[in-house]
Amino acid sequence: MNYLAIDTSGNHLTVAARGKKSVLIYREDVGLRHSVTLMDAVEQCLSEAELTLRETEVFACATGPGSFTGIRIGVATVKAFAYANAGKVLPVTSFEALAYNAGKAGSRLALIDAGHGYRYVCGFNGENEVVFPPAYLPDGEILSLAKDYASVLVPSPYGFPGEIVSSVGKGFVAATEAKLGLASEDREILVPLYVRKSQAEENAEGKEKT
């Protein structure tokens, strides 16, 4: 099954495609300029893969957690491609990218730094099925939760013990290809994954309570 997959969830940019060839374009630091760099990367990737948008069966997108603006750009772009070209859509979370790129077998707890001593967390079994849904937890609770898992996965050494596994580039592609059979014709399932409310929403709720 051919596909086009886009990850704009952080400072990086990943665009991957499988047509007559499999191609991965990864740019480590685009400075959150996805709106400027994305389309050129898509055109290059499709050209090298010898694939057109009309021929693409599945359009995949990283849904987060990650950059609020970057994720929205990716989701909007992929959804537009899918509608215009009658393709299926496939959401891929940053947690799944970590889990599918991990070297160790068995259950794993995937963590993404949320700042201020909190992490976004999601638990997987040995078949990479979600057994603990995405949550926003403090380090103390995560340390206790981690005892139930064979390994803890972190995307960078930010002070929490665990196996350092990249969620971008090859990790994102591995998750995409593993999930292709779950792609859906319902394009409205492709939405950003917000594990917690945005700062603006929290501020608005705070004002309502005062």
Image: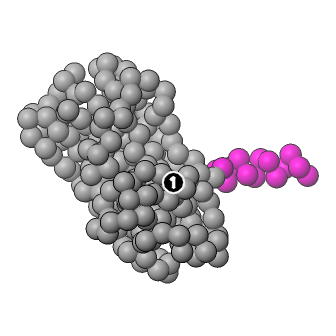
Inspect this view and state whether residue 28 appears: yes
Q: Confirm whether the magenta stretch covers residue 209.
A: yes
Residue 155 rendering spot, x and y as whole percentages: 40, 67
Q: Confirm whether the magenta stretch covers residue 47.
A: no
| Horizontal arrangement in the rendering, residue 26 relative to residue 196 (left or right) | left
What amino acid type should be assigned to the residue bearing mark 1? Val
Closer to us: 141 or 198: 141
Relative vertical location of residue 14 with respect to residue 89 in this rendering, above or below: below
The scheme the figure's colours follow is: one colour
Inspect this view and state whether residue 47 appears: no
**What residue lies at 48% left-to-right and 31% top-to-bottom?**
189
Closer to us: 15 or 109: 109
Question: For the magenta stretch, what is the residue range?
Answer: 197-210
> Dot 1 lies on which element?
strand
Mark 1: give few (<14), some (14-19) or many (20+) Cα within 10 Å. Answer: few
User: Please, what is the dominant secondary structure of the magenta stretch?
Assistant: helix
**What residue lies at 67% left-to-right and 54% top-to-bottom?**
199
Residue 4 placement: quadrant: top left
Residue 154 placement: quadrant: bottom left
Q: Which residue position holds label 1?
A: 131
Relative vertical location of residue 157 with respect to residue 173 in this rendering, above or below: below
Residue 9 rendering spot, x and y as whole percentages: 42, 51
Closer to us: 21 or 209: 21
Residue 149 rendering spot, x and y as whole percentages: 48, 69
**What residue lies at 19% left-to-right and 49% top-to-bottom?**
24
| Horizontal arrangement in the rendering, residue 127 relative to residue 51 (left or right) | right
Relative vertical location of residue 144 with respect to residue 209 in this rendering, above or below: below
Residue 192 rendering spot, x and y as whole percentages: 51, 42
Quarter of the rendering occupied by the N terminus? top left
Residue 128 placement: quadrant: bottom left
| Horizontal arrangement in the rendering, residue 72 relative to residue 43 (left or right) | right
